[in-house]
Amino acid sequence: MPVLMLVMTTSLGGAPADSAADVAAMDTFTNTWQAIGTVSSETNPMAMGLTTMCNINMLYFFIAVLVCVFVADDFRSGYAKNIFTVRAGKADYVISKIITCFVGCGLMFLGFFMGAVLGGAIAGLPFDTGIAGITGVIMCMLAKLGMVAVFVGIDFAASAAAKGKTWMSIIGSMVAAMLLYMMVPMVTPLDSGILNVILCFAAGGLLCVGLGAVNCQVLKRTSLV
């Protein structure tokens, strides 16, 4: 996906900004790291351009689908009811699902990052990090992984409440994702520092623990079908 975005938009929109011909007509990527984020001084959460919408942040919507389908299938197939009866407790199930979803979604973000690097190389886009520096890019990715925990916690809560109703959990998760989406570029800019990373992981950890406890009570007090 990032390879197609970077290569196709560059070829359709014109040459990179550092060439003789400027970017034409449509909004295009002029730097590889635009697929990851923008520096804090250039961040505009209300912007609706191609480079601000079609970047790594849109994977947070993919998280909603992945988590909701993953959890809803357990309830729809009867697996959750069976495992609670035979072996695992509610807390064990919640913890294992949140950890598994976090790891899976984190790998999805790392895959997008590697695809962006490959796509930028194929498209001939510059890799200049500017004021962000290599450290800023690394911290940006770590901060985004911290935000993954935030979205996983919310999406799992919607899934646990909806049980086997995949459509209901996805709708609830998407609504939450849209409300938080505008905040992501501000807390995870390309020039992120260690404070951004700490805040994102702290928020993700607290949210997962808090909502996880609520989910345990929901599963204990409601029917599993």
Image: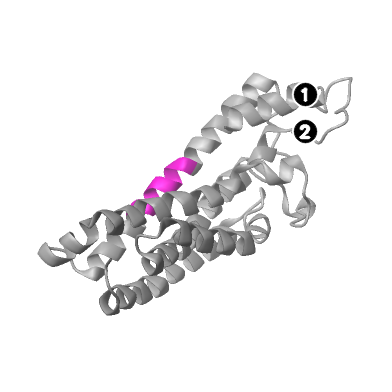
Label 1 sits on what residue type? Leu
What element does badge 2 sit on?
Answer: loop
Q: Is residue 176 left or right of residue 9?
A: left
> For residue 78, what is the image quadrant?
bottom left
Rendered location of residue 225, percent (x, y):
28, 66
Front: mark 1 or 2:
1
Q: Earlier in the sequence, mark 1 or mark 2?
A: 1
As for residue 70 lying within the magenta part, the answer is no
In magenta, the rendered stretch is: 100-108
Rendered location of residue 45, percent (x, y):
74, 57
Q: Label 2 neighbourhood size at 10 Å, few (<14), some (14-19), many (20+)?
A: many
Disc 1 to disc 2, C-alpha distance: 8 Å
Farthest residue, direction left: 86
Label 2 sits on what residue type? Thr
Residue 131 seen in the figure: no
Rendered location of residue 10, percent (x, y):
74, 25
Q: Which mark is residue 12?
A: 1
**Residue that appears at 59% across and 32% down:** 2
Check if mark 1's residue and mark 2's residue have beta carbons within 8 Å: yes
In the foreground, 86 or 141: 86
Residue under label 2: 28
**Residue that appears at 30% across and 65% down:** 94
> For residue 119, what is the image quadrant?
top right
> For residue 36, what is the image quadrant?
top right
Rendered location of residue 24, percent (x, y):
87, 28
Name above or below for residue 20 compared with residue 200: above
In the foreground, 33 or 224: 224
Name above or below for residue 60 compared with residue 11: below
